[in-house]
């Protein structure tokens, strides 16, 4: 058996899931389709942002018709330079139609592409559920709120960018 290599005394470079120390601008994009759910996701997201000191003036909110339109709105917002991160909020509920697969799939693919295109966090806050009850459960206050979690993901990814920049420029 090989002897284990002695661990170095030097600390590893490590990036923690922290929120950013510098001011950031956040764009919320929400779908009108299934608004009784997306309103709740929005409440959760705003709650998380507020708790972490993001001022209302640094948050913009855009409504789009449905989840299918979220990627284009995210793309336009990032190309305009108005935000550092986009949180896309939607609810695609199966309801026995094949439309579900197209809307949910294209929305996920599009959002991921936009994030990689601009090198900015584009957060997937789109519930994809079989039933209305499941959607409401994930957008509530008791069993957790996907909007809240997604706002935290956006802040953590911005915190990641900040820490990465500090590693690249230790004088910061
Ligand atoms: N949009 C949603 O956000 N959720 C859905 O569940 C949904 N379903 O089931 O059809 C939905 N469809 C609309 C779609 O997002 C577009 O707005 C529409 O097709 C126009 O492009």
Image (tube, helix red, strand yellow):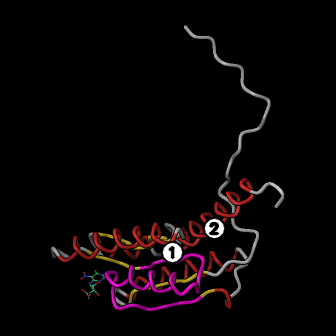
User: Looking at the image, which residue sits at the far right?
Assistant: 171
Q: Residue at x 78, y 34 (%)?
A: 10
In the rendering, at what x and y percent does residue 100 appear?
A: 23, 74
- Depth check: 138 or 8 in front? 8
In the rendering, at what x and y percent does residue 19 appear?
A: 69, 66
- Depth check: 16 or 78 in front? 78
Which mark sits nearer the N-terminus, 2 or 1?
Answer: 1
Q: Residue at x 56, y 66 (%)?
A: 153
Q: Residue at x 52, y 83 (%)?
A: 28
Q: Residue at x 40, y 76 (%)?
A: 136
Vertical placement of residue 53 versus 32, above or below: above
Which quadrant of the figure contains the N terminus?
top right
Left or right of 70: which side holds 144? right
- Depth check: 165 or 94 in front? 165
**In the image, the residue with mark 1 has its CB under 8 Å from the nearest atom of ligand 1:** no
Residue range in magenta is 60-89
Left or right of 59: which side holds 170? right
In the rendering, at what x and y percent does residue 138 appear?
A: 43, 70
Give SS at disc 2: helix
Tag 2 residue:
158
């Amino acid at each position: 058996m090989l002897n284990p290599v002695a661990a170095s005394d030097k600390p590893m470079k490590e990036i923690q899931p922290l929120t950013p120390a510098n001011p950031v601008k956040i764009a919320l994009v929400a779908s009108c389709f299934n608004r009784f759910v997306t309103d709740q996701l929005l409440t959760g997201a705003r709650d998380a942002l507020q708790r972490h000191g993001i001022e209302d003036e640094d948050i913009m909110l855009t409504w789009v018709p449905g989840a299918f339109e979220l990627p284009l709105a995210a793309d336009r917002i990032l190309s305009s330079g108005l935000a550092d991160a986009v949180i896309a909020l939607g609810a695609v509920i199966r309801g026995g139609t094949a439309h579900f697969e197209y809307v949910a799939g294209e929305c996920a693919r599009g959002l991921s592409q936009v994030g990689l295109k601009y090198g900015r966090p584009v957060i997937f806050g789109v519930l994809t559920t079989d039933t209305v009850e499941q959607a409401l459960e994930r957008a509530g206050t008791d069993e957790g709120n996907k909007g809240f979690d997604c706002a935290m993901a956006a802040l953590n990814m911005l915190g990641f960018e900040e820490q990465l920049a500090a590693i690249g420029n230790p004088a910061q």
